[in-house]
Image (tube, rainbow, N blue to C red):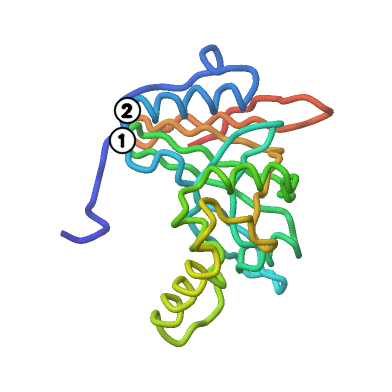
Amino acid sequence: MALADIRKEYAKARLDEQSIDPHPLVQFQRWMDEALAAQLPEPTAMNLATVTPDGRPSARTVLLKGVAQGQFQFYTNYQSQKGVELESNPACALTFFWPELERQVRIEGIAQRLDAAVSEAYFQSRPRGSQVGAWASPQSAVIEHRELLEKRVAEIEKRFAANTHLPKPHQWGGYGVTPHEIEFWQGRPSRLHDRLVYYWVDSEWKIKRLAP
């Protein structure tokens, strides 16, 4: 089958101004709860788009770990490509896509590092293997072969053999994205999708409908 011939008709639900919550984070939590209840695979997976210092777009998938203090939170290595790019330019975009529900959420905002105590608390909640991995991996750096990574893991395991939980590496922690625009997309028949977007204007959220 040719890619251009692939078709899917969306007809599971609708989205209108009367049913949507006045606050986007409440609406987001409503949709997230429905994605979790539907037992979707990786419902917290989101595309994180950043910008390189020379203006090129860069994107990858990360996991949402919380929505608190008006921010979408995730964790990473600050020395990774995304970490370096966010330090240079904190403007970024997040995208959730839940095809089983025929829904997408698109977020634009500004990222900032979470408080060190928040990052430490989350790091201590992680499985020990993930803690070891955070110490061992120089994320986004070029390595010659996997054996080097496995050697680093063995070294970290030996170094912290007496520790049930490892301390958080200084180069690892969280970011919170404060949104200024959030779009909710619901698939509809004949590609006439519902798109409602919240804009942060004059210290309040305003809702507009976009053409599909």
Q: Which percent across, then down, holds residue 27?
A: 55, 23
Q: Which percent across, then down, holds residue 207?
A: 65, 25
Q: Which percent across, then down, holds residue 191?
A: 37, 37
Quarter residue 7 falls in: top left
Task: Identify the residue shown where x is 58% and y is 48%.
Answer: 123
State left or right for residue 45 relative to residue 112. left
Rendered position, 19 above or below 34? above
Task: Identify the residue shown where x is 46% and y is 40%.
Answer: 44
User: Most extreme residue toward the front, as rendered?
Assistant: 162
Label 1 sits on residue: 100
Disc 2: CA contacts within 10 A as few (<14), some (14-19) or many (>=20) = few
- 3D distance between C-alphas at marks 2 and 1: 9 Å
SS label for mark 1: helix
Quarter residue 43 falls in: top left
Q: In this view of the protein, which residue sits in the foreground, 79 or 185?
A: 79
Rendered position, 119 above or below 206? below
| Screen quadrant of the N terminus | bottom left
Of the numbered discs in the image, which one, if any, rests on residue 14?
Answer: none
> Hey, what amino acid is under mark 2?
Ala
State left or right for residue 42 relative to residue 54. left
User: Most extreme residue toward the top, as rendered?
Assistant: 18
Q: In this view of the protein, which residue sits in the foreground, 206 or 98?
A: 98
Q: In this view of the protein, which residue sits in the foreground, 158 or 140?
A: 158
Rendered position, 116 above or below 204? below
Label 2 sits on residue: 38
SS label for mark 2: loop
Q: Do the residues under discs 2 and 1 have CB atoms within 8 angstroms?
A: yes
